[in-house]
Amino acid sequence: MEKMKAIVFNKKSYPDKLVYCEVDKPVPNDNEVLIKMHAVSLNAADYRSMKMGIIPKRKIFGADISGRIETVGKNITQFKTGDEVMGDLASFGFGGLAEYVTAPETALIIKPEQVSFDEAATLPMAAMTALQALRDKANIQKGQKVLIVGSSGGVGTFAVQLAKYFEAEVTGVCSSKKVRQALSLGADYVIDYTKEKFTNKDKRYDIILGINGNYPLTAYRKTLASNGIYVMIGGSLSQIFKSLVFGWILSFGSKKMKSLAAKANRTDLELLAKLLEKGIIKPVIDRHYSLDMTADAMNYLKQGHSTGKVVINIEPNINY
Ligand SMILES: NC(=O)c1ccc[n+]([C@@H]2O[C@H](COP(=O)([O-])OP(=O)(O)OC[C@H]3O[C@@H](n4cnc5c(N)ncnc54)[C@H](OP(=O)(O)O)[C@@H]3O)[C@@H](O)[C@H]2O)c1
């Protein structure tokens, strides 16, 4: 059996549960491709799954991937050896934190040539979440006022850019050192949460995305304009729980309180890859780590203050 390097989850390993080691190289079945990995971006989904004990079968995390197809199963029709691809493997067993991963073709799209492997790996989960929140849950319209609470993280940096793409007026909420970045991404206004509370202001919003921070649902509701829509995306686990349980109770009258569970699909990923290719959205990459340093990268992400995305470079010799 051929071997490869990977980051394997081991709940007994101390202090980190992510161990850099050698494992069997996966073999694709007839309906899968084998991908030589180039980059993976980390998501809260990786460390939250670990915390909740939801461990992939091969014990290898990493969902948002980019790489080059090395071999294809005999039923594969849409890809060939050498194709550069990107995708979200969260619904297909993860596995991206490794030199090779297998995936069904339904998980993948062709990576646009002008888009780097790094940029491609940032896109799937974070940008798709932002897109589905704005377009599908909030039905965003030109000129609407949008408040993005948690505008500086992986999801937030895409949400600011996508809301501008939909021609909305955008207000970001982040800490002092990220204000300039939010403005550079296109935000019209920024509220520095270390200096003032968005809840204390008179302004009302047509759409509020709750991405990070821990604010009462009643505060979000109060800050909505009539006919406004709040979409809970993330934050602390208690915040998510309260939104799911009490959100519908607070959805009386013209204001709606919704929750998003983003679903990966190729049509949305293709749209986002096009926007990236055209320069309409640009990933913000906070830090790069090599595969053997994944535990450090995950610890950094877990602190909850990264600016944009954290990327693991699997193939260091590629010019990213
Ligand atoms: N619903 C879904 O389908 C879905 C999908 C993907 C992700 N999520 C969830 O979305 C959340 C965000 O994901 P992410 O990838 O964007 O995380 P992330 O990259 O780790 O977010 C980090 C950012 O959060 C900001 N932040 C922390 N506390 C804040 C506060 N009180 N107010 C405003 N901003 C604050 C930090 O800015 P400062 O350093 O300036 O504080 C930092 O830039 C997670 O909870 C994740 O589980 C949900």
Image (cartoon, rainbow, N blue to C red):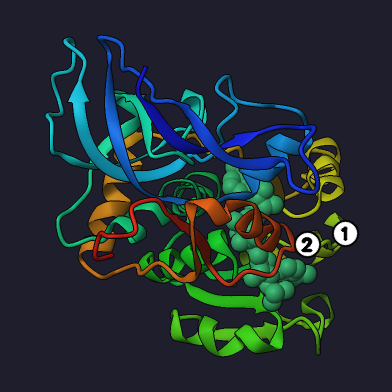
Q: Residue at x 51, y 63 (%)?
A: 309
Does mark 2's beta carbon lie closer than 8 Å to ligand 1?
Answer: no
Q: In which quadrant of the rendered view does residue 224 lie?
A: bottom right
Is residue 317 shown left or right of residue 233? left
In this rendering, the answer to whether 109 lies above or below 301 is above
Amino acid, disc 1: Pro
In this rendering, the answer to whether 263 lies above or below 295 is above
Looking at the rendered structure, the secondary structure element under dot 1 is: loop
Location of residue 11 in the rendering, given as x and y in whole percent from the top left corner: 77, 32
Which one is in front, 32 or 38? 38
In what quadrant of the picture does the N terminus appear?
top left
Tell me if residue 164 can be seen.
Answer: yes
Looking at the rendered structure, the secondary structure element under dot 2 is: helix
In what quadrant of the picture does the C terminus appear?
bottom left
- Please state the quadrant of the image where ligand 1 appears: bottom right
Location of residue 285 in the rendering, given as x and y in whole percent from the top left corner: 46, 69
Marks 2 and 1 close (CB-CB < 8 Å)? yes
CA separation in Å, label 2 and label 1: 7 Å
Is residue 253 shown left or right of residue 154? right
Tell me if residue 231 can be seen.
Answer: no
Location of residue 36 in the rendering, given as x and y in whole percent from the top left corner: 29, 38
In this rendering, the answer to whether 2 lies above or below 15 is above
Q: Residue at x 47, y 63 (%)?
A: 158
Amino acid, disc 2: Tyr
Q: In which quadrant of the rendered view does residue 18 lie?
A: top right
Does mark 1's beta carbon lie closer than 8 Å to ligand 1?
Answer: no
Location of residue 202 in the rendering, given as x and y in whole percent from the top left corner: 77, 82
Q: Residue at x 80, y 44 (%)?
A: 14
**Badge 2 is on which residue?**
220
Which one is in front, 86 or 133? 86
Q: Residue at x 87, y 59 (%)?
A: 216
**Badge 1 is on which residue?**
216
